[in-house]
Image: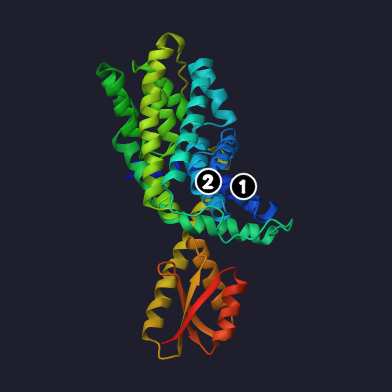
Amino acid sequence: MTQFLESCWCVLGSLAPWLLIGALVTGVLHAWLPRGFIQRILSGRGGVLSAVAIGIPLPLCSCGVIPAGVGLKEDGASDGATVGFMISTPQTGVDSIMVSAGFLGLPFALFKVGSALLTGVIGGWLADAVSTETQGTSEVQPEDGSRPGLREGIAHTVDVLRTIWVWLVFGILASAAISVWIPTETLTAVANWGSLGAGLAALALSLPLYVCATASVPIAAAFVAGGLPASAALIFLMAGPATNIATMGAVHRALGGRMLAVYMGTLMFGSLSLGLLFDFVIGPSMVTATVAHGDHGGGIFGDASAIMLLALFVFFGWESVSRWLQARRLRSSTERVSVIQVSGMTCGGCRGKLERVLNADERVSAASVNLEPGEARVHGTITESELRELVFDAGFEPGDFLLV
């Protein structure tokens, strides 16, 4: 158990800085970019290309890209642009490219960048092809030069983290368990399985595991040095940073099961195919593995970020318990109950925002909001017109009203 807890802290320390940076990026973009800007440039086929081009150089890993991708979606980006961004961004980054060149050679690093570009574009186009959303009809304010501002940007950052925190906790625990009970050294035992067998083993290990694009390079180099083909290292470096259990849950929560299937299918088939292509076209002779040893944790900054993220987890947990207790109290209350349909809510952050607005009003004794169906259940003396005004001022569209 001690080893498991230490592994949890190690994963949290590696994850937290990039996660907080990703959340900060999406908050800054939300506050700084004009309203409607994201929707305009990140829609359609051209939007997918723009999203991938923006994402490839950013130093964001799988958990760092979650809040950034969810934030782009909430600001009006299409499903395809969001999926393309979330596939390509965690595979690369300027720091990861440089480390890959140092550990595995320049040809390997360049092929890895091209692979991220290709999988991001294909995944984004596939997502748009199967998406049920209607391009251009998202309820986002037109671009008029106005900006949300710093306060709204900070609230947006917290709301994005609030949406995915449960999946993050689950992902940290799962990743730590894998690290403790499935050591990376055991993968070298499959070296005699050939490129396909080793690639499948690397894929199976990398999908649920949290590894960042930069810190995973020494692990991949150790695989190659231990006898695995370069294809297995490439598959690990593509699928590992771009997936883990937290990412899968967050993609499903933010975009739905159909987009998750496109996301995972593109990464799995793309990484395996491109890994085998690397062995066929370039070959192991062009890869020279340099193995480094040492602690790849986040240091003081990682510890500080981990403490900050833990504090947020505790806060979000307290909010969830309070919401559950409030819902129980509402069910047993004899006060007048108003139910209003609400459209425009896309995530837990939207739900939390509307709940806070409603509960802050002195005419409301308690309120709870559900995403599916989109509705708010309000106890208190507030009238229909007053409730509609509150919902509209919160940024959502009020619908049918009913007194229970």
Image quadrant in which the N terminus is located:
top left
Q: CA distance from mark 1 to mark 2?
A: 10 Å
One can see residue 352 in this view: yes
Q: x and y percent of residue 387 in the render? A: 56, 81
Q: What residue is drawn where x is 36% and y is 20%?
A: 276
Q: x and y percent of residue 44 in the render? A: 54, 44
Image quadrant in which the C terminus is located:
bottom left
Which quadrant of the view contains residue 268? top left
Which quadrant of the view contains residue 275? top left
Asked if the residue under mark 2 is in contact with the one under mark 1, i.e. CB atoms within 8 Å, the reply is no
Q: x and y percent of residue 399 in the render? A: 50, 76
Mark 2 belongs to which amino acid?
Leu
Seen from the viewer's position, the closer of residues 107 and 47 is: 47
Q: What residue is drawn where x is 55% and y is 71%?
A: 397
Answer with mark 1 or mark 2, whichever residue precedes in sequence. 2
In the picture of the structure, the residue carrying the numbered disc 1 is 25
Relative to 50, residue 352 above or below: below
Q: What residue is drawn where x is 62% and y is 73%?
A: 393
Relative to 248, residue 266 above or below: above
Describe residue 54's horizontal placement relative to residue 79 as left or right: right
Q: For marks 1 and 2, give the one nearer the viewer.
A: 1
